[in-house]
Image (cartoon, coloured by chain):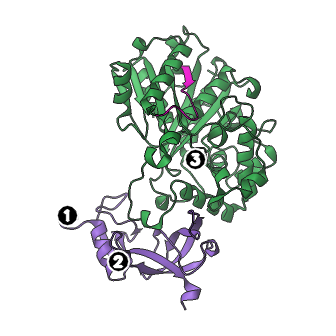
Amino acid sequence: MQSLTEKSPLGTFLEHMKKGELAYQVTDDGKAIFYPRAVAPETGGNLEWRVSKGLGTVYTTTAVHYKGEAPLNVALIDMDEGFRLMSRVEDIAAMDVKIGMRVTFRAHPGDEKQAPYPVFTPVERSK
Amino acid sequence: MSGLTKGSVAVVGAAESDLGLVAPNTSPVDLMAQGTMRALDDAGLKLSEVDAVFAAATQSRFAPMALSEYLRIKPRYFDGTIIGGSSFMTHVAHAQAAIEHGLCEVAVIAYGSTQRSVSRAAASPREYNYYESPYRPILPISAYAMAAARHMHEFGTTREDLAEVAVAARKWALKNPKAWEKEPLTVEDVLNARMVSYPFTVRDCCLVVDGGGAIVLTSAARAKSLRKKPVYVLGVGEALSHSTISNMPDLTVTAASESGPRAFGMAKLKPSDVDMLSLYDAFTITPILFLEDLGFCPKGEGGRFVSGGAIAPGGKLPVNTSGGGLSYCHPGMYGLLVMIEAIRQVRGECGERQVPNCEVALAHGNGGVLSSQCTVIFGSASTL
């Protein structure tokens, strides 16, 4: 089992994110796991890190309305490798993000308060 | 597998605290204590007879201790399980287990919140989560909105179907003098209200008000000698499926599909035996999901089921006769009040909104972001 005194699951994820990589884990029997963990869910076994190819499909989506801001997209993305994460589809109006839309990963750089994090853009537009 | 016994315990007291907007500097524990004394008066029991305290509140981290200190009682059994709005249904199940095992005899289950007075952000601060917080969802609203969006996509549920839930709740609320909302509401009003998180406008979302209350449980044997007609616990079921919305396996299927059959199994009843439903309506999508998952209509049919006023006064199935979290009261963890309405319907105390011959009432609690699901089935003596 991974030691938690040297590196945390999120710490490893962020190292990948800083290199522009979307990392996830797989169990001994090849099941994709997200969010990153210290032990495998269901079995308690080992987890191995992988880097996603970055392609996924919008599972569901909402447009959040904050006062004085353009509507903000929040979506759940099903990655082709078989894991799901919350994210945002950018380069498109929030209400134009549709369930079933194919999207591709990019790293949002974050800022001094926020570590980099994964966002997505529509596959069609990014061609 | 042995489990709890149908009808071994009964609710003998039930009462809300003051609701709506309470005086400045009222504490959540003030409301819990007020609700407790009203519920004990309702039962004809004295504070000194209470030997178990179950409590949960987002503003009181160690709620059973806070309430016991306030009332200067020393319970021999206590439980502060906090899993969101369904916490109190879980407390009923846990209290029943404790009473059956002789660990206590008179259990108070209490709740209080001043979220309207102090703001929702102050009453229920959210934990930072790297995997969700950067995207700025308005939680819990956006989580339920994404469940609704998926339901619309898979099953053709419409925003009008969602609005029907809010309209039905408002029609019931107009028959409840304690309800916060006093004006009629139409489907158009819901659709045209301020958008919060698509597909939800502010009228698809529960109220943000102060409130609380308490119920008192005791053994069936003790219940017979008390002031009010006992309302028996016929069945309980608890289930968890996830904590964060990004980890909910299927956003159109809740763990009510597990808690419901557990409660019905214990009660030896089926959905068609239920006379009224009290379903946690934090958002307009939740009663639709629970009607499906508890077996009142097939999966995917919930939107069509509620259309045409089917759950409103005069409809085919009475749901949320208090006016619900959408129009009566929603102090943040509304499950206790969900049960109080079901209990009152079985007692026949609901006046203008009373469901005729209500012998079996189902109260379903939801917590987190569709995360915890707990079902309690209440019944009159004739159902034992």
Q: Which mark is residue B257?
A: 3
Asked if badge 1 and badge 3 are on a common chain, one would say no
Q: Residue furthest bottom?
A: A127
Q: Residue at x 39, y 26 (%)?
A: B67
Which of pointers 1 and 2 lies earlier in the amino acid sequence? Answer: 1
Q: Give the structural element (helix, strand or loop) at label 2.
A: helix
Colour assignment, chain A: purple
Residue B256 position in % (x across, y down): 56, 45
Identify residue for label 1.
Answer: A3
- Quarter of the image for the N terminus of chain B: give it: top left
| Amino acid type at mark 2 | Met
Q: Is residue B160 magenta?
A: no
* Identity of the residue drawn at 46% across and 60% down: B247
Q: Residue at x 48, y 64 (%)?
A: B136
Q: Residue B292 location in percent, x, y?
A: 66, 48
Find residue A7 and report its horizontal and vertical position in percent: 22, 68
Q: In the depicted view, which residue is nearer to us: B359 or A99? A: A99
In front: label 1 or label 3: 1
Q: Colour of chain B?
A: green
Task: Kindly identify the amino acid type of the residue bearing the numbered disc 3.
Answer: Ser
Label 3 packing within 10 angstroms: few (<14), some (14-19), many (20+) = some
Instruction: Examine the structure image and report whether residue B15 is included in the region drawn in magenta.
Output: yes
Mark 2 nearby-residue class (10 Å; few <14, some 14–19, many ≥20) = many
Say above or below: B23 vs A56: above
Instruction: Give SS at disc 1.
Output: loop
When the figure is inspected, residue B377 is found, relative to residue A32, above or below; the finding is: above
- Residue topped by disc 2: A17
Q: Are marks 1 and 2 on the same chain?
A: yes
In this view, B257 is above or below A112 = above
Task: Kindly state the secondary structure of the residue where label 3 is placed.
Answer: helix
Output the chain of dot 1: A
